Amino acid sequence: MPEFHPALVEQGRRIIKHGLDVPHDADLVPLSCDVIEGDLAAALFAHGDALEWVVFEHDTDWYSLGCTAISTTESPANGDQPRLEIRFDTWGRSRTKGWSLRGGHLVHTRILRAQRIAQLRVAARTIATPHGWAIMVWRGRRRPAIAVDNL
């Protein structure tokens, strides 16, 4: 597993508060961000040949539920066809919501490779994919519907 960038959590907070265009460390490039109603958020970064991300919940401030990193190599371009590919799925338990037997407070994270896709519409929110990667988060067992807007 790759080593986490020391500023990952701090930079993640800045991205979810101010968007992808905030100044950042040269070796930690923001790729995607997803925020759900000021309650749950995730930020995805490129760091060397790895993808790193951090998931947050909001109580009185954004605090980290944890960080994850995977090594990645770019797959060869598949022509001009838009393509959405799941690269990583994970889940954990909420720290701010009480545990429910039905899993209503599970926190899911999904990393997607979005080739030739401008943005994803997930439930009522939009996730931009300016670098061809997306991160999405949700609570509960059911994955929200995803719609694709091509370039």
Image: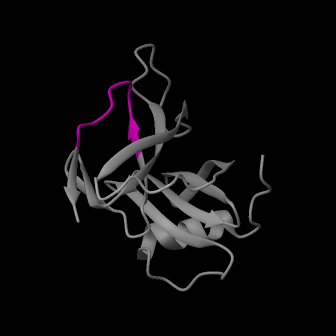
Residue at screen point 37% across, 57% down: 115
Q: Give 138 or 60, whichever is nearer the viewer.
A: 138
**Residue 74: in magenta span:** no
Farthest residue toward the front? 79
Residue 125 x/y as whole percent: 24, 55
Residue 62 x/y as whole percent: 53, 59
Residue at screen point 59% across, 55% down: 53
Instruction: State left or right for residue 54 relative to residue 84.
Output: right
Q: Give 83 or 141, whichever is nearer the viewer.
A: 83
Q: Give 40 or 46, whichever is nearer the viewer.
A: 46
Q: Quadrant of residue 93?
A: top right
Instruction: State left or right for residue 91 relative to residue 139.
Output: right
Farthest residue toward the bottom? 23
Farthest residue toward the top? 101
The tally of labels here is: 0
Magenta stretch, main secondary structure, is loop
Q: Quadrant of residue 80?
A: bottom left
Residue at screen point 39% across, 35% down: 139
Q: Give 117 or 94, whichever is nearer the viewer.
A: 117
The color scheme shown is one colour
In the rendered image, the vertical position of residue 121 relative to residue 15, given as above or below: above
- Quadrant of the drawing holding the C terminus: bottom left
**Residue 142: in magenta span:** yes
In the rendered image, the vertical position of residue 98 relative to residue 56, given as above or below: above
Residue at screen point 38% across, 24% down: 141
Bounds of the magenta segment: 137-146
Residue 69 x/y as whole percent: 67, 50
Residue 51 x/y as whole percent: 62, 56
